[in-house]
Image (spheres, rainbow, N blue to C red):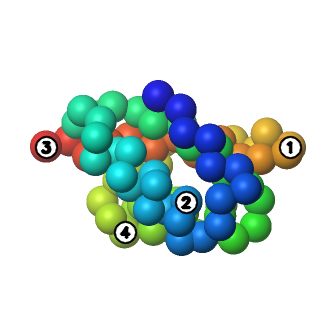
């Protein structure tokens, strides 16, 4: 599943990511597209603190691709 949050400011991008993860099945992988700067600096740390697993962060030149695994129940 993919969530494009380019152009979305903090903390709204974190809130939208968390809401999407809550709608997904346990263990499912979500791909989130984030802007450079504050979004890619803040969102992964916030998700880790909320108990989600960051699988990979890829620099795609214009934006970052964050892969986060939903919590296993």
Neighbours of disc 4 within 10 Å: few (<14), some (14-19), many (20+): few
Marks 1 & 4, CB-CB < 8 Å contact: no
Outermost residue toward the top? 1
Residue pictured at 38% horizontal, 55% vertical: 18
In whole angstroms, how far apart are the C-alphas of marks 2 and 1? 19 Å
Label 1 SS: loop
For marks 3 and 1, the one nearer the N-term is 1
Question: Mark 1 sits on what residue?
Answer: 61
In whole angstroms, how far apart are the C-alphas of marks 2 and 4? 15 Å
Neighbours of disc 1 within 10 Å: few (<14), some (14-19), many (20+): few
Q: Which mark is residue 49?
A: 4
In whole angstroms, how far apart are the C-alphas of marks 1 and 4? 27 Å
In whole angstroms, how far apart are the C-alphas of marks 3 and 2? 24 Å
Residue pictured at 29% horizontal, 36% vertical: 24
In whole angstroms, how far apart are the C-alphas of marks 3 and 1? 35 Å
For marks 4 and 3, the one nearer the N-term is 4
Residue 61 relative to residue 24: left or right: right
Q: Which mark is residue 73?
A: 3
Neighbours of disc 2 within 10 Å: few (<14), some (14-19), many (20+): many
The spot of residue 54 in percent (x, y) is 46, 49
For marks 3 and 2, the one nearer the N-term is 2
Residue pictured at 28% horizontal, 41% vertical: 23
For marks 1 and 4, the one nearer the N-term is 4
For marks 2 and 4, the one nearer the N-term is 2
Marks 3 & 1, CB-CB < 8 Å contact: no
Label 3 SS: loop
Label 2 SS: helix
Outermost residue toward the left? 73
Question: Mark 2 sits on what residue?
Answer: 13
Q: Is residue 66 above or below residue 47?
A: above
Number of the front mark, 2 or 1? 2
């Amino acid at each position: 599943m993919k969530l494009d949050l380019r152009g979305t400011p903090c903390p709204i991008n974190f809130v939208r990511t968390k809401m999407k993860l809550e709608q997904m099945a346990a263990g499912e992988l979500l791909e989130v597209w984030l802007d450079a700067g504050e979004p890619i600096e803040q969102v992964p740390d916030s998700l880790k603190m909320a108990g989600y697993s960051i699988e990979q962060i890829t620099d795609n030149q214009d934006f970052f691709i964050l892969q986060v695994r939903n919590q296993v129940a």
